[in-house]
Amino acid sequence: MDWTGGLHMAVTTLDTLGTTPGSLTACGFRAMIVSKLIDNVDLTIHSRSNMKISTKGEYGIRAMIELAHRFGQGYVQSAEIAAVRDVPENYLYQLLITLRKAGLVRSRRGPQGGHMLSRPPERISLAEVVVALEGPLAPVTCVQDSVVDDCRFADTCVVRDVWRRVTDATRQILEETSFAELTERERERQSAVEAAS
Protein backbone atom coordinates (compact mmCIF):
# COMPACT_ATOMS: atom_id res chain seq x y z
CA MET A 1 0.00 0.00 0.00
CA ASP A 2 5.03 -0.43 0.59
CA TRP A 3 3.91 -0.50 4.18
CA THR A 4 6.32 -2.27 6.52
CA GLY A 5 4.79 -5.55 7.43
CA GLY A 6 1.80 -4.88 5.20
CA LEU A 7 -1.42 -6.55 6.04
CA HIS A 8 0.43 -9.82 6.59
CA MET A 9 0.11 -8.70 10.22
CA ALA A 10 -2.59 -11.36 10.46
CA VAL A 11 -0.01 -14.10 10.06
CA THR A 12 2.37 -12.22 12.35
CA THR A 13 -0.34 -12.00 14.99
CA LEU A 14 -1.03 -15.72 14.74
CA ASP A 15 2.68 -16.51 15.04
CA THR A 16 2.95 -14.25 18.09
CA LEU A 17 0.20 -16.23 19.74
CA GLY A 18 1.94 -19.48 18.88
CA THR A 19 -0.91 -20.40 16.58
CA THR A 20 -0.58 -21.23 12.90
CA PRO A 21 -3.12 -20.59 10.15
CA GLY A 22 -3.21 -24.32 9.55
CA SER A 23 -4.24 -25.05 13.11
CA LEU A 24 -7.03 -22.52 12.87
CA THR A 25 -8.37 -24.25 9.79
CA ALA A 26 -9.09 -27.28 11.94
CA CYS A 27 -11.33 -25.05 14.01
CA GLY A 28 -13.12 -23.83 10.93
CA PHE A 29 -11.28 -20.52 10.65
CA ARG A 30 -8.66 -19.27 8.24
CA ALA A 31 -7.42 -15.78 7.40
CA MET A 32 -4.64 -14.97 5.00
CA ILE A 33 -3.74 -11.69 3.37
CA VAL A 34 -3.05 -12.37 -0.30
CA SER A 35 -2.46 -8.91 -1.71
CA LYS A 36 -1.76 -5.36 -0.67
CA LEU A 37 -0.99 -3.09 -3.60
CA ILE A 38 -0.39 0.63 -3.17
CA ASP A 39 -0.74 1.27 -6.90
CA ASN A 40 -4.48 0.64 -6.82
CA VAL A 41 -4.77 0.69 -3.03
CA ASP A 42 -6.28 -2.77 -3.30
CA LEU A 43 -6.67 -4.40 0.11
CA THR A 44 -7.75 -8.03 -0.13
CA ILE A 45 -8.35 -10.25 2.86
CA HIS A 46 -9.58 -13.77 2.16
CA SER A 47 -11.36 -16.02 4.59
CA ARG A 48 -14.17 -18.52 4.51
CA SER A 49 -16.57 -15.57 4.37
CA ASN A 50 -14.56 -14.15 1.40
CA MET A 51 -13.94 -10.83 3.15
CA LYS A 52 -12.35 -8.19 1.01
CA ILE A 53 -12.35 -4.51 0.19
CA SER A 54 -15.08 -4.24 -2.42
CA THR A 55 -15.15 -2.24 -5.64
CA LYS A 56 -16.97 0.42 -3.65
CA GLY A 57 -14.06 0.72 -1.25
CA GLU A 58 -11.40 0.58 -3.95
CA TYR A 59 -13.06 3.25 -6.10
CA GLY A 60 -13.70 5.45 -3.07
CA ILE A 61 -10.04 5.25 -2.05
CA ARG A 62 -8.96 6.10 -5.59
CA ALA A 63 -11.19 9.18 -5.53
CA MET A 64 -9.82 10.27 -2.16
CA ILE A 65 -6.23 9.93 -3.40
CA GLU A 66 -7.05 12.14 -6.39
CA LEU A 67 -8.66 14.74 -4.13
CA ALA A 68 -5.63 14.56 -1.84
CA HIS A 69 -3.34 15.31 -4.79
CA ARG A 70 -5.48 18.35 -5.59
CA PHE A 71 -6.00 19.60 -2.07
CA GLY A 72 -5.73 23.38 -1.94
CA GLN A 73 -6.64 23.79 -5.62
CA GLY A 74 -10.36 24.29 -5.05
CA TYR A 75 -13.29 22.10 -6.01
CA VAL A 76 -12.72 19.25 -8.47
CA GLN A 77 -15.45 18.09 -10.85
CA SER A 78 -16.48 14.47 -10.47
CA ALA A 79 -15.96 13.96 -14.21
CA GLU A 80 -12.28 14.83 -13.77
CA ILE A 81 -11.87 12.43 -10.87
CA ALA A 82 -13.66 9.68 -12.79
CA ALA A 83 -11.48 10.14 -15.87
CA VAL A 84 -8.15 10.23 -14.02
CA ARG A 85 -8.93 7.35 -11.67
CA ASP A 86 -10.93 5.17 -14.08
CA VAL A 87 -14.09 5.16 -11.99
CA PRO A 88 -17.62 5.15 -13.53
CA GLU A 89 -18.91 8.68 -12.94
CA ASN A 90 -22.41 7.67 -11.83
CA TYR A 91 -20.96 5.24 -9.32
CA LEU A 92 -18.43 7.82 -8.17
CA TYR A 93 -21.20 10.31 -7.48
CA GLN A 94 -22.82 7.90 -5.01
CA LEU A 95 -19.49 7.23 -3.31
CA LEU A 96 -18.83 10.94 -2.91
CA ILE A 97 -22.22 11.35 -1.23
CA THR A 98 -21.25 8.65 1.27
CA LEU A 99 -17.87 10.27 1.88
CA ARG A 100 -19.52 13.67 2.31
CA LYS A 101 -21.95 12.29 4.89
CA ALA A 102 -18.96 10.81 6.73
CA GLY A 103 -17.43 14.29 6.92
CA LEU A 104 -14.49 13.42 4.66
CA VAL A 105 -15.48 15.37 1.55
CA ARG A 106 -17.00 18.79 0.95
CA SER A 107 -19.19 19.28 -2.13
CA ARG A 108 -20.69 22.24 -3.97
CA ARG A 109 -23.12 22.33 -6.88
CA GLY A 110 -22.94 24.50 -9.96
CA PRO A 111 -20.50 25.23 -12.80
CA GLN A 112 -17.78 26.19 -10.32
CA GLY A 113 -18.67 23.40 -7.95
CA GLY A 114 -17.27 19.95 -7.39
CA HIS A 115 -15.63 18.12 -4.51
CA MET A 116 -12.68 18.59 -2.20
CA LEU A 117 -11.34 17.07 0.99
CA SER A 118 -12.94 18.45 4.12
CA ARG A 119 -9.54 18.71 5.81
CA PRO A 120 -5.86 18.37 4.86
CA PRO A 121 -4.85 14.91 3.58
CA GLU A 122 -2.42 14.42 6.46
CA ARG A 123 -5.43 14.58 8.78
CA ILE A 124 -7.48 11.93 6.98
CA SER A 125 -6.59 8.30 7.60
CA LEU A 126 -7.20 5.33 5.36
CA ALA A 127 -9.15 3.78 8.24
CA GLU A 128 -11.76 6.56 8.13
CA VAL A 129 -12.42 6.00 4.45
CA VAL A 130 -12.52 2.21 4.67
CA VAL A 131 -14.97 2.30 7.58
CA ALA A 132 -17.15 4.93 5.85
CA LEU A 133 -17.40 2.84 2.69
CA GLU A 134 -17.12 -0.74 3.95
CA GLY A 135 -18.26 -0.70 7.56
CA PRO A 136 -16.46 -2.28 10.56
CA LEU A 137 -12.91 -3.54 10.13
CA ALA A 138 -13.52 -6.71 12.14
CA PRO A 139 -13.16 -9.97 10.14
CA VAL A 140 -15.97 -11.59 12.16
CA THR A 141 -18.97 -10.00 13.84
CA CYS A 142 -18.20 -11.34 17.31
CA VAL A 143 -15.31 -8.87 17.71
CA GLN A 144 -17.25 -5.80 16.60
CA ASP A 145 -17.73 -3.36 19.45
CA SER A 146 -21.29 -2.59 18.38
CA VAL A 147 -22.44 -6.20 18.21
CA VAL A 148 -23.93 -7.89 21.24
CA ASP A 149 -22.34 -11.31 21.37
CA ASP A 150 -24.83 -14.14 21.69
CA CYS A 151 -22.44 -16.98 20.81
CA ARG A 152 -22.62 -19.76 23.36
CA PHE A 153 -18.84 -20.19 23.13
CA ALA A 154 -18.12 -16.51 23.83
CA ASP A 155 -16.63 -17.03 27.28
CA THR A 156 -14.27 -19.81 26.21
CA CYS A 157 -13.52 -19.06 22.54
CA VAL A 158 -9.77 -18.65 22.07
CA VAL A 159 -10.07 -18.00 18.33
CA ARG A 160 -12.03 -14.82 18.96
CA ASP A 161 -9.01 -13.49 20.84
CA VAL A 162 -6.97 -14.00 17.66
CA TRP A 163 -9.54 -12.16 15.53
CA ARG A 164 -9.58 -9.33 18.02
CA ARG A 165 -5.82 -8.93 17.71
CA VAL A 166 -6.03 -9.15 13.91
CA THR A 167 -8.69 -6.41 14.01
CA ASP A 168 -6.56 -4.22 16.27
CA ALA A 169 -3.51 -4.67 14.04
CA THR A 170 -5.50 -3.88 10.90
CA ARG A 171 -6.99 -0.79 12.52
CA GLN A 172 -3.57 0.43 13.64
CA ILE A 173 -2.07 0.12 10.15
CA LEU A 174 -4.99 1.89 8.49
CA GLU A 175 -5.18 4.61 11.13
CA GLU A 176 -1.47 5.32 10.82
CA THR A 177 -1.70 5.68 7.04
CA SER A 178 -2.77 9.15 5.94
CA PHE A 179 -3.74 10.27 2.46
CA ALA A 180 -0.78 12.62 2.49
CA GLU A 181 1.44 9.55 2.81
CA LEU A 182 -0.39 7.73 0.03
CA THR A 183 -0.14 10.64 -2.40
CA GLU A 184 3.56 11.08 -1.67
CA ARG A 185 4.25 7.42 -2.30
CA GLU A 186 2.25 7.49 -5.49
CA ARG A 187 4.28 10.48 -6.73
CA GLU A 188 7.48 8.61 -5.97
CA ARG A 189 6.32 5.55 -7.89
CA GLN A 190 5.14 7.59 -10.84
CA SER A 191 8.51 9.38 -10.96
CA ALA A 192 10.34 6.04 -10.84
CA VAL A 193 8.24 4.68 -13.73
CA GLU A 194 8.83 7.81 -15.80
CA ALA A 195 12.56 7.70 -15.11
CA ALA A 196 12.75 4.08 -16.20
CA SER A 197 10.88 4.65 -19.45
Image (tube, rainbow, N blue to C red):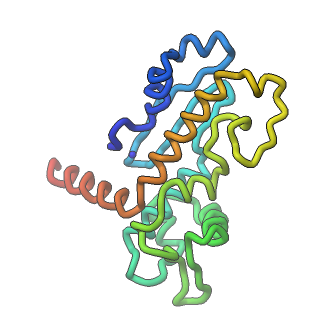
Q: Nearer the viewer, residue 19 or 113?
A: 19
Numbered disc total? 0
Percent position (x, y) of residue 92?
60, 64
Residue displayed at 67% across by 13% down = 27
Residue 71 located left or right of residue 149: left
The image shows residue 125, relative to residue 97, as above or below, that is: above
Residue displayed at 49% across by 39% down = 169
Q: Nearer the viewer, residue 197 or 154?
A: 154
Percent position (x, y) of residue 96?
61, 68
Residue displayed at 76% across by 26% down = 155
Residue 38 located left or right of residue 139: left
Percent position (x, y) of residue 151?
82, 28
Q: Nearer the viewer, residue 29 or 114?
A: 29
Q: Nearer the viewer, residue 2 or 4?
A: 4
Residue displayed at 39% across by 46% down = 1
The image shows residue 87, relative to residue 147, as above or below, that is: below
Residue 6 located left or right of residue 58: left
